[in-house]
Image: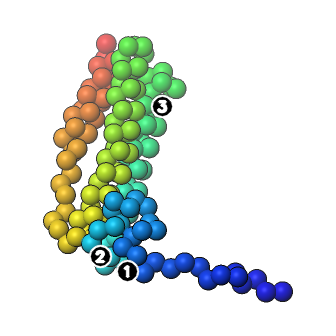
Amino acid sequence: MDLSPSTPPEKYSPGDRGKSRFPKRVYSVGSDPDPRFTLANERTFLAWLRTSLAFIAAGVALEAFGFPESDEFRTVSAIVFIAIGVASAVRAWIGWAKTEKALRLNESLPSLGMGLVLVVGIVIGVSLVVLGAIL
């Protein structure tokens, strides 16, 4: 019994210019960079997603464990942490796409851009938790 496919699988060739890869707006420009750089970019993307999940889990945990005692502080701090988590996930996608495009075009890598917003959000969220625990 022959288990081989009847048609050979499609292979990506540099002449395709990324037509079969998603997202097209990233892969349709430039040329393929060194795979090590692409893989490093993907690891960074996954690290941002992992961080995003941690922030969302922190927001859910605050509500689930009822800490701090004050309902107002707990709800607002949980919302802040969940919002930071969602923003981190969005930043992960946008940052991955911008970096991949810059690698393909041999341009300078983009800056973080959202770093200050995330730091301010974390400070606000932690401050609300501490104030809720004290008051």
Q: Earlier in the sequence, mark 1 or mark 3?
A: 1
The residue shown at (52%, 26%) is 64
- SS type, badge 2: loop
Residue picked out by circle 2: 31
What amino acid is at disc 2? Ser
Image location (x, y in percent) of residue 116: 18, 41
Q: In which quarter of the image is the N terminus?
A: bottom right
CA separation in Å, label 1 and label 3: 47 Å
Residue 39 visible to an observer of this rendering? no
Nearer to me, 14 or 47 = 14
Q: In which quarter of the image is the C terminus?
A: top left
The residue shown at (29%, 68%) is 29
**Badge number at residue 14:** 1
- SS type, badge 3: helix
What amino acid is at disc 3? Ala
Q: In this view, does 80 lie above or below 94?
A: above
Q: Earlier in the sequence, mark 3 or mark 2?
A: 2
Indicate which label's residue lies in the foreground, 1 or 3.
Answer: 1
What amino acid is at disc 1? Pro
Q: Is residue 113 above or below residue 9?
A: above
Left or right of 71 in this view: 88: left
Left or right of 68 in this view: 3: right
Image location (x, y in percent) of residue 132: 34, 18
Residue picked out by circle 3: 61
Disc 2, disc 1: CB below 8 Å?
A: yes
Nearer to me, 25 or 84 = 25
Label 3: how many Cα within 10 Å (few below 14, some 14–19, many 20+)? few
Indicate which label's residue lies in the foreground, 3 or 2.
Answer: 2
Image location (x, y in percent) of residue 95: 29, 54
Disc 1, disc 3: CB below 8 Å?
A: no
Nearer to me, 114 or 28 = 28
